[in-house]
Image: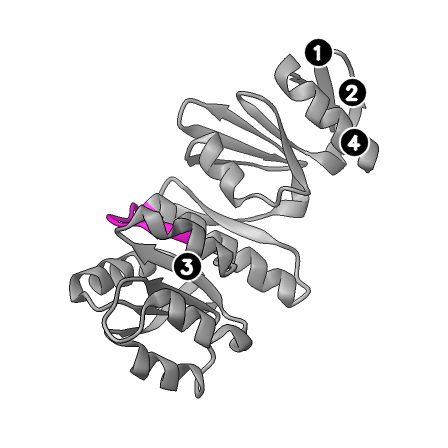
């Protein structure tokens, strides 16, 4: 379970994050804070894996606070209504940058990124959670062969299982480790380690033949050669 805190001087913003966190099965928002002083004291006494951090706040900005706690090595997701802070935020090695009003889908992407990073630090296989109907399903990324998109519905294919979730392929790509997966077509992403054969217009993944678009071929060849 990921333990998170949220820091924002606007109570309404904290309410949104708390409501979203309740929907994520692997996340516990243990405490919201209206100021950085109380949050700093909490960080030095409690285990926290992830911080949702507003940028424009009185007394101490979110970016200054991130620099202050850098030695604690916490994952940070900036939450702000101002897009012009994005470069500064990512320069501080932020995990993600969410623009208000925050959509739940983007919030979930950030949580999945943080969860994957958390598992890797613990030496566990990376995984994400997706919603299949009314259920949350854990997908171990090392078991995924390929992902197929049909409009806003994704089909995640493993050797002996298929999981469907309502999401775009671009949203899924944002959550996948770039060193393990690659896009080969507007409707397909494949696991590099699962590719058995590369042909001019298709790739074989497991026992399935998947179309290879010309625009993705060069990038795929370069990645496979590096492997």
Q: Is residue 10 left or right of residue 222?
A: left
Q: How is the image coloured?
A: one colour
Ranked by sequence position, the earlier of labels 2 and 4 is 2
163 and 15: which is toward the camera = 15
Ranked by sequence position, the earlier of labels 4 and 3 is 3
Q: Label 2: state its secondary structure.
A: strand
Q: Position of residue 176 (x, y in %)?
A: 57, 43
* Image: magenta residue range: 96-104
Mark 4, residue position: 224
Q: CA distance from mark 4 to mark 3?
A: 33 Å
Q: Label 4: state its secondary structure.
A: helix
Circle 3 or circle 2, nearest the eye: 3
Q: Label 1: state its secondary structure.
A: loop
Q: Which mark is residue 201?
A: 1
Q: Position of residue 125 (x, y in %)?
A: 66, 56
**Residue drawn at x 33%, y 60% as measured from the top left:** 21
Q: CA distance from mark 3 to mark 1?
A: 40 Å
């Amino acid at each position: 379970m990921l333990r998170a805190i949220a820091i924002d001087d606007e109570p309404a913003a904290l309410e949104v994050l708390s409501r979203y966190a309740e929907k994520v099965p692997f996340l516990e928002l243990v405490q919201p804070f209206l100021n950085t002083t109380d949050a700093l004291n909490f960080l030095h006494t409690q285990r926290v894996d992830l911080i949702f951090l507003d940028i424009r706040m009185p007394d101490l900005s979110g970016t200054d606070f991130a620099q202050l706690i850098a030695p604690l090595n916490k994952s940070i997701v900036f939450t702000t209504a101002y897009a012009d802070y994005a470069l500064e935020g990512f320069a501080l090695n932020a995990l993600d940058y969410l623009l208000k009003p925050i959509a739940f889908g983007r919030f979930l992407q950030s949580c999945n990124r943080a969860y994957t990073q958390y598992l890797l630090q613990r030496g566990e296989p990376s995984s994400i959670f997706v919603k299949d109907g009314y259920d949350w399903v854990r997908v171990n990324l090392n078991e995924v062969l390929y992902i197929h998109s049909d409009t806003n519905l994704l089909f995640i294919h493993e050797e002996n299982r298929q999981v469907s979730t309502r999401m775009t392929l671009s949203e899924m790509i944002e959550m996948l480790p770039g060193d393990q997966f690659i896009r080969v077509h507007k409707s397909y992403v494949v696991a590099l380690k699962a590719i058995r054969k590369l042909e001019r217009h298709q790739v074989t993944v497991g026992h399935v033949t998947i179309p290879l678009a010309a625009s993705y071929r060069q990038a795929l060849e370069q990645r496979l050669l590096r492997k």
